[in-house]
Amino acid sequence: MTKDIIALASDHGGLEMKAMVAALLQEKGFGVLDLGAHDGQSVDYPDFAVAMAQVLKDGRATRGVLMCGSGIGISIAANRFAHVRAALVHDSYGARMCRLHNDANVLVLGGRTTGPEVAKECVEIFLATPFEGGRHARRVAKLAENGQA
Ligand code: RB5
């Protein structure tokens, strides 16, 4: 069975981590859609959040992983899109909870703040954990409504 396509994008601050995450996903049998950056030149993280939002919108990927130096800028940028629920995560607890309670469709990692082993663990948990639904579905629905205020 073909597994999901996972989109990856980062600025220069998350480039090394993106390569590591791509290798992990391929090893696990996921398809990888690499939206850049493709070299170490200094680039602007909002551009990569836009690229991620587009592929999630048009269905070219089902979920994504975004990275920048801290993970902060690119998560702010990604969450400007109502269909994106991007969770900046630093540990396995966050990776699990962002799926169980928030139905996050994008995991965000800081290339300069999170070590490779923790990052790999976060990716694996993020992809393996289902949304719990129930009362959390009501709350997640309100996230989209709040965007209209
Ligand atoms: C780039 O130097 C850095 O500002 C960026 O990767 C990110 O950490 C921004 O939030």
Image (cartoon, rainbow, N blue to C red):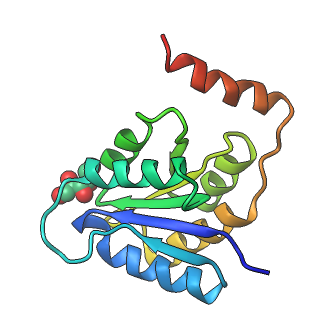
Q: Nearer the viewer, residue 37 or 15?
A: 37
35 relative to 76, above or below = below
Which residue sits furthest bottom? 27
| Residue 89 in sight from this viewpoint | no
Return the x and y of residue 133 as percentages of the image width and height.
82, 38
Q: Nearer the viewer, residue 58 or 63?
A: 58
Return the x and y of residue 31 as percentages of the image width and height.
58, 77
Which residue sits furthest top? 149
> Which quarter of the image is occupied by the N terminus?
bottom right
Quadrant position of residue 122: bottom right
Residue at 49% across, 65% down: 7
Return the x and y of residue 128 as percentages of the image width and height.
74, 66
Residue at 66% across, 84% down: 28
**Quick check: 147 left or right of 13?**
right
Return the x and y of residue 5 as percentages of the image width and height.
60, 69
149 relative to 54, above or below = above
**Quick check: 125 left or right of 11?**
right
Residue at 52% across, 78% down: 117
Quadrant position of residue 96: bottom right
- Ligand 1 shows up in the quarter that is bottom left
Residue at 13% across, 71% down: 41
